[in-house]
């Protein structure tokens, strides 16, 4: 068993790999919004989360068993545990319960507070730099997401569901900071797989009831749960770990502003939801802000 270490020879591949990882993360997590809506029609929130990550944990556990990666040091154990308990289990529970009462556009807006949380904490705790131009781009993206929320037609109402979604955004941001140091010693896929397995264990008390609900679920609901386990979970979480290992935490998180407009695009093809003119403008601003942040990169 050996620790993961990057080399200078990887430098030429890093940009391409990071770009692919970011694209997979955005597409995977953006598709989760319509999939969660479909899944909640057949499952309760905790049961949907338990089944989703039980599906993702099986290949993750096989990967860890075959690769036998370096064991974490004692001072790293809490960082791995944090990823499973907070980034997977608590994040999923809060988001699923939140989406029971919060519209997709509003949820996307609230979730996109996460990159701002991350940027602030990365500067304070990791010593990362975020230039004025980067903050300007962040404001542009955040404005675009706000327009998407307004265009959703339901408005942005800070009820209990919205606060739960805000809590899930905070879980994501804090985990980015907590697990960032792990990438100096561990392979990103090891970290992602560990998150899947530990998160599934945290949600496992709800798995028996999830199986009972799956036995009577319709095809659409069961298909959504399986899809959530494979694409937004197994693939997207692994892609996000890869992106985070190659980019500063604040910069990597800025790409997450693309999740909401991408979700609207997926909703158009998957659910036939036609975005309004305001929604298109908001999506353009969200994309433009990300471009501004990366102008000097």
Image (cartoon, rainbow, N blue to C red):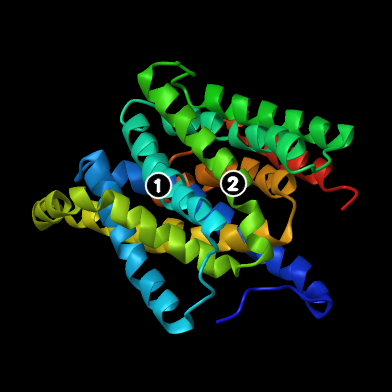
Q: Nearer the viewer, residue 93 or 227?
A: 93
Residue 136 figure quarter: top right
Few, some or many residues within 10 Å of mark 2 (<14, 14–19, 20+): some
Secondary element at image label 2: helix
Q: Secondary structure at mark 1?
A: helix
Q: Nearer the viewer, residue 38 or 15?
A: 15
Q: Nearer the viewer, residue 272 or 85?
A: 85
Residue 295 is situated, as x and y percent measured from the top left of the image, at 87, 47
Residue 277 in percent (x, y) is at 61, 30
Residue 250 position (above or below residue 137): below
Q: Gap in Å between the C-alphas at discs 2 and 1?
A: 12 Å
Q: Is residue 186 above or below residue 135?
A: below
Query: What is the x, y in percent for residue 150?
Result: 54, 21
Name the quarter where the N terminus is drawn.
Answer: bottom right
In the figure, is residue 248 to the left or right of 62? right
**Is any part of residue 224 visible from this angle?**
no
Q: Which mark is residue 180?
A: none
Residue lying at the far front of the rendered structure: 74
**Mark nearer the N terminus (2 vs 1):** 1
Q: Residue at x 53, y 42 (%)?
A: 172
Question: In the figure, residue 36 lies in which quadrant?
Answer: top left
* Left or right: where 147 falls relative to 43: right
State the residue at coordinates (55%, 63%): 73
Q: What residue occupies the far right of the structure in this picture?
A: 296
Q: Which residue is mark 2?
A: 178
Q: Is residue 148 above or below residue 176?
A: above
Task: Out of 233 and 4, give the one closest to the viewer.
Answer: 4
Q: Does residue 126 appear left or right of residue 226 in this picture?
A: right
Residue at 39% in and 45% down:
34
Give the label on residue 85, or none: 1
Q: Is residue 241 visible?
A: yes
């Amino acid at each position: 068993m050996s620790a993961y270490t990057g080399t200078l020879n990887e430098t030429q591949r890093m940009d391409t790999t990071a770009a692919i990882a970011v694209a997979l993360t955005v597409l995977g997590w953006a598709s989760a919004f319509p999939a969660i809506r479909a899944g909640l029609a057949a499952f309760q929130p905790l049961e949907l989360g338990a089944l989703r990550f039980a599906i993702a944990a099986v290949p993750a556990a096989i990967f860890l068993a075959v690769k036998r990666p370096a064991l974490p040091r004692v001072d790293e154990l809490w960082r791995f545990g944090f990823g499973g308990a907070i980034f997977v289990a608590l994040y999923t529970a809060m988001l699923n319960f939140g989406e029971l009462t919060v519209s997709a556009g509003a949820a996307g807006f609230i979730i996109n507070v996460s990159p701002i949380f991350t940027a602030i904490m990365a500067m304070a705790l990791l010593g990362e730099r975020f230039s004025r131009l980067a903050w300007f781009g962040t404001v542009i993206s955040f404005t675009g997401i706000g327009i998407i929320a307004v265009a959703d037609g339901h408005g942005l109402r800070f009820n209990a569901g919205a606060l739960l979604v805000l809590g899930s955004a905070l879980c994501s941001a804090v985990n980015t900071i907590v697990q960032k140091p792990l990438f100096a010693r561990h392979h990103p896929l090891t970290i992602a797989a560990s998150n899947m397995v530990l998160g599934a264990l945290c949600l496992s008390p709800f798995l028996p009831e999830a199986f009972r609900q799956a036995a009577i679920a319709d095809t659409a609901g069961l298909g959504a749960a399986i899809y959530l386990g494979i694409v937004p979970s197994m693939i997207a979480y692994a892609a996000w770990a890869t992106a985070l290992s190659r980019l500063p935490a604040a910069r990597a998180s800025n790409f997450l502003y693309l999740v909401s407009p991408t979700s609207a695009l997926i909703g158009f093809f998957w659910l036939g939801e036609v975005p309004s003119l305001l929604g298109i403008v908001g999506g353009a601003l969200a994309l433009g802000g990300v471009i501004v942040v990366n102008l000097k990169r």
